[in-house]
Amino acid sequence: MHEAASMLDMAARLGWRSHGLVEPNPMVGAVIVRDGRVIGMGRHRRYGGLHAEREALADCARRGENPRGAMVYCTLEPCRHTGKQPPCTEALIEAGVAGVVYACPDPAPESGGGAAVLREAGIEAHLSVASALASGLAAPFVHRVRTGLPWVIAKWAQTIDGRIATRTGESQWISGERSRARVHRLRSRVDAVLAGIGTVLADDPMLNARSVGKVRRVARRVVIDSDLDIPIDSKLVATAREVPTTVICAQELLHVRLTEEKRNRLTVAGVEVLGVLGGAATAGWLDLRSALKLLVDRHDVTTVLVESGPGLLGSLMEAQLVQEAVVYVAPLLLGDELARGAATGRVAASLSSGIRFQLVRQRRVGNDVELIYRRHGGWTTGAEV
């Protein structure tokens, strides 16, 4: 059990290095061990590239090690299908490994079931929950496959007493420079950054990654804007041909003359304008679940970072659409009951009606504290290890 936990932890840390490089594929790491000694390591480095198990086997060859009879520890069940790469099960069988321990079943119907293939070939294969890091590494991928929705990360900075802005809306800057730098780093690794029209009108943000050494992926900027109020001269519209930008409005506005000129001007500027119906999970009468699914269907989005005001965030929380929260707590206290909180719009008459998260990581960042929460514990995409 101890070896499984430590080796799966190692595999998870390897896989994490590919955050922002492999999506919509999952991050995966693999370690090959003989007699307690690591003889090969690998990770899925980039979308379309070698899978972790095959890279680990190649690493054995580079080291002059023979993987026959060795144990393989991988964060995700080895795949059994041919996609951009051949099946990992095939490579493991050919290598003659003795067994495979994996931390998460592959939920994809076309690639899952690799453990059964290995067992049929006489290779011991079993699931281990010894490492929470490894079990949760592929959580965004698993969530998308199972629900058809992206993994949503809410981010906010707050004072000690839980306020994200003064009563007048002043919020720049609650958190310190180092915390803000980490947010830019996270933006450079997610598929989309989402905000509401209120944030756009108040702050005219860029919502892109800046001052980052290497941007791993350019996140699509998404604005929830039911009435199509986004200004043509906003920074988002002005830079839409440089950074992919989508505005999601009420579906009926896509077909009325009242908004035709606005839609045309946005399209000419490079903005994608999409529409969704209203529904139970609404923000300004938009169905947020449908909006998120639209991002998956049209743009293969797996991870969404929410940088919004309390209204939109409250609606996302109420609809159970947020899986992770990245919170920066600054050493500042306002003590004003009218100062703004992180999420509003919910009715929570008792503690039992609150939305419960689990703290999975905490660290000091300058004078701030970074807190990472998950709905179901385990790994976090918002923190590094």
Image: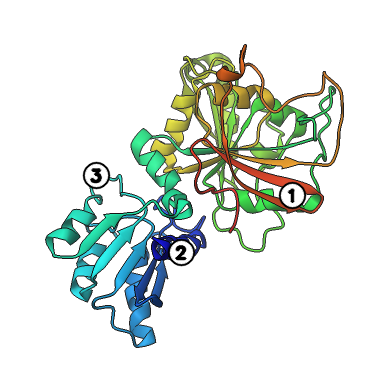
Image quarter in which the N terminus is found? bottom left
Q: CA distance from mark 2 to mark 3?
A: 29 Å
Vertical position of residue 47 compared to residue 231: above or below: below
- The tag on residue 109 is 3
- Residues at discs 1 and 3 in contact (Cβ within 8 Å): no
Measured from the top left, where is residue 258 in percent x and y? 57, 14
Q: Looking at the rendering, which quadrant does residue 82 occupy?
A: bottom left
For label 1, the SS is helix
Vertical position of residue 29 compared to residue 381: above or below: below
Q: Residue at (12%, 59%) from the top-left corner? A: 120
- The tag on residue 179 is 1
Of badges 2 and 3, nearer the viewer stands 2
- Residues at discs 2 and 1 in contact (Cβ within 8 Å): no
Callout 2 amino acid: Ser
Measured from the top left, where is residue 23 in percent x and y? 44, 52
Vertical position of residue 4 compared to residue 168: above or below: below
Of badges 2 and 1, nearer the viewer stands 2
For label 2, the SS is helix
